Image (cartoon, helix red, strand yellow):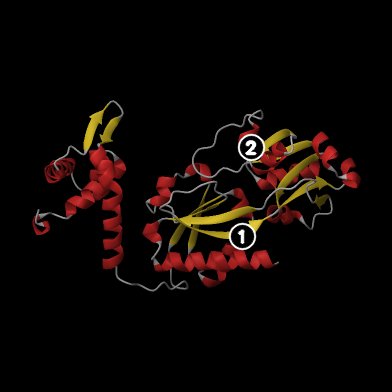
Amino acid sequence: MNISKVDLNLLVYLDVLLREGSVTKAANQLSITQPAMSNGLRRLRDLFKDPLLIRTSGGMTPTKRAIELQPIIRDVLSKLETTIKPEVEFSPLQSNRTFRIMASDYAESTLLMEVIRRLTKLAPNVTLDLITPSDVTFHDVEHGKVDMAINRFDELPLSFHQKVVWYDSFCCVLNSQNPIVSNFNLDNYLTSKHIWVSKTGFGVGVGIDPTEVQKLGWVDAELTKIGKQRSIRVFTRHYHVALQLAKAQNLVATLPSKAAKLYIQDPDIIMLEPPFDIPPIALKMAWSPLLQHDAGHIWLRRLITEAGNDLTEK
């Protein structure tokens, strides 16, 4: 086939169709009429000699050929977008851009407080829209709808770019009058009541089943390795709540050290090393390949990296 006779706009149509899985949604995304989108799908079927999308009980379902084409088309369009997009330098002082960042409570309380402080000086008109992990999917980041995801991830799609911001150890936070402070060992740790904090990565969170130890995360995984289990009485998704509970009650919170140190000046709180080994966790930032070469995004990544480095050195 002579490619000069192919309407390359059809590749854009196919990319959006496969992403949205709906002629109506694809038409809205491209700001064209539904009949025009339907005509585009008909031409795509003629071009590839394949139905591409088939109506099923679950909606429009891509064929095997369409599934094979999707990453190829996305890669081609991404490279074209990067090639033809004019090179524009990012000026932080003049920019009024909004960056949407998915961040865990841990990242928001520690890293992003410092990032916001720097933004106030370096980019006073830039806005941050901070989104919780439960409000974001991998697809939102992949398609560039969210500029950045900052969290502790068990795994990420291979297409994502990622960078470790820092590694953090764990510590135990207790009320300074807690009776076990003077003899803080593994036995006393296990006989105490505990607070658990979510490690949610992406997507809508669900309730916790305390009996499913293998799903509780790093602290409980390490206890399982030595044949032990702690008694968790409060499950929360917020580090400040965990810290306040540890301060007010005889509950133990085992937290990443940078989160715990938010209360380091509080005389009613004491921080102790865990009485068993817990490997450090990695805080990562992840972003779409669509934003890899964006000047403003490059500037933001550099700012976050510098903030993370400075906080690690303190």
Q: From this viewpoint, which residue is outermost toward the front?
A: 226
The label shown at residue 84 is none
Q: For numbered disc 2, what is the local secondary structure?
A: loop
Q: Amino acid at mark 2?
A: Leu
Q: Which mark is residue 166?
A: 1
Q: Residue at x 59, y 31 (%)?
A: 207
Q: Residue at x 44, y 48 (%)?
A: 157
Choose the circle earlier in sequence order: 1 or 2.
1
Residue at 40 percent across and 53 percent down: it is 159
Residue 29 position, x and y percent, is: 27, 47
Quarter of the figure that contains the C terminus: bottom right
Residue 43 is situated, as x and y percent measured from the top left of the image, at 12, 44
Residue 303 at least partly seen: yes
Q: Position of residue 142 (x, y in %)?
A: 40, 51
Is 28 displayed left or right of 184 in the figure?
left
Label 1 neighbour load within 10 Å: few <14, some 14-19, many 20+: some
Name the side, left or right, on which 246 lies relative to 154: right
Give the CA distance from mark 1 to mark 2: 22 Å
Q: Which residue is mark 2?
A: 216
Q: Amino acid at mark 1?
A: Trp
Q: Quadrant of residue 264?
A: bottom right
At x 22% / y 33%, what residue is drawn? 54
- Callout 2 environment at 10 Å: few (<14), some (14 to 19), or many (20+)? some
Q: Horizontal placement of 6 versus 191: left or right?
A: left
For residue 148, say whether it is visible. Answer: no
Q: Look at the numbered disc 1 and give the secondary structure of its residue.
A: strand
